[in-house]
Image: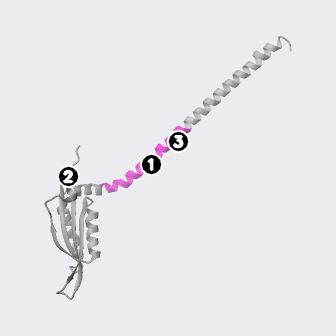
Amino acid sequence: MSAYTRPILRYGLIMPTMFNCLLLSGVIAGVSKLATLRAEKEERYIEQTQRLAAMKKLEADLAPKRKTFQDQKILLKGDPGQLFTRILDTLLPKFKEIEIERIGIVFPLDRGRFGSQIKTDVARVKSSFQGGLGPMQEALLQVESLMPQAVLEELKITRKTNQLLDQREYLVMEITHTCWKALDEKK
């Protein structure tokens, strides 16, 4: 090689090739970084659109139930003792006296075990029934499903025999519920 061709090869061929290789590697690194960034942003976008779709679906599911929720809020703000009595008054006529009969309902003034722990107004309801187990369970189910704020404080079931009417056996159930009253929301 001559002294003339060596600088031509060095500065005319090798240096531009190295410069182009460095430039190409920089472009490839930049493109891969941008592709990674784009993939992350596309993933976030898809996740966000899925969240929005899920929120819209949830809103569509809840919209018809809002009226029920508002009715339940009104029930929770009302007097628990009156609500308890109203539920029992609508339930008991469905059964015959031989199936279930309300013996008594009392509203004790003391707060009870659970009422002393609750910092809101409470009403205690002590009710007594006699009859069969199935209707009694139905009565308890109705009360506790329609009054979510009712806490069963005491349940006592005893077996009794009616000696006057041909030895018929029945159950006597004494129930004590503590019902709390919902506080008004502060705005």
| Residue with the mark numbered 1 | 53
Residue 43, disc? 3
Residue 120, disc? 2
Disc 3 versus disc 1: distance between alpha carbons? 15 Å
Q: Toward which corner of the image does residue 65 lie, by quadrant?
A: bottom left
In this rendering, the label closer to the viewer, 2 or 1: 2
Colouring chosen for the image of the structure: one colour
As rendered, which of 2 and 56 lies closer to the eye? 2
Q: Residues within 10 Å of mark 2 (few under 14, many from 20)?
A: few
On the image, the x and y values in percent for residue 98 come to: 22, 81
Q: Residue at x 34, y 53 (%)?
A: 63
What secondary structure is found at the residue carrying circle 2? Answer: loop
Disc 2 versus disc 1: distance between alpha carbons? 40 Å
Disc 2 versus disc 3: distance between alpha carbons? 48 Å
Q: Toward which corner of the image does residue 106 lie, by quadrant?
A: bottom left
Which one is earlier in the sequence, the residue at label 3 or at label 1?
3
Residue range (magenta): 39-66
Q: Which residue is drawn at 21% across and 60% down?
A: 178
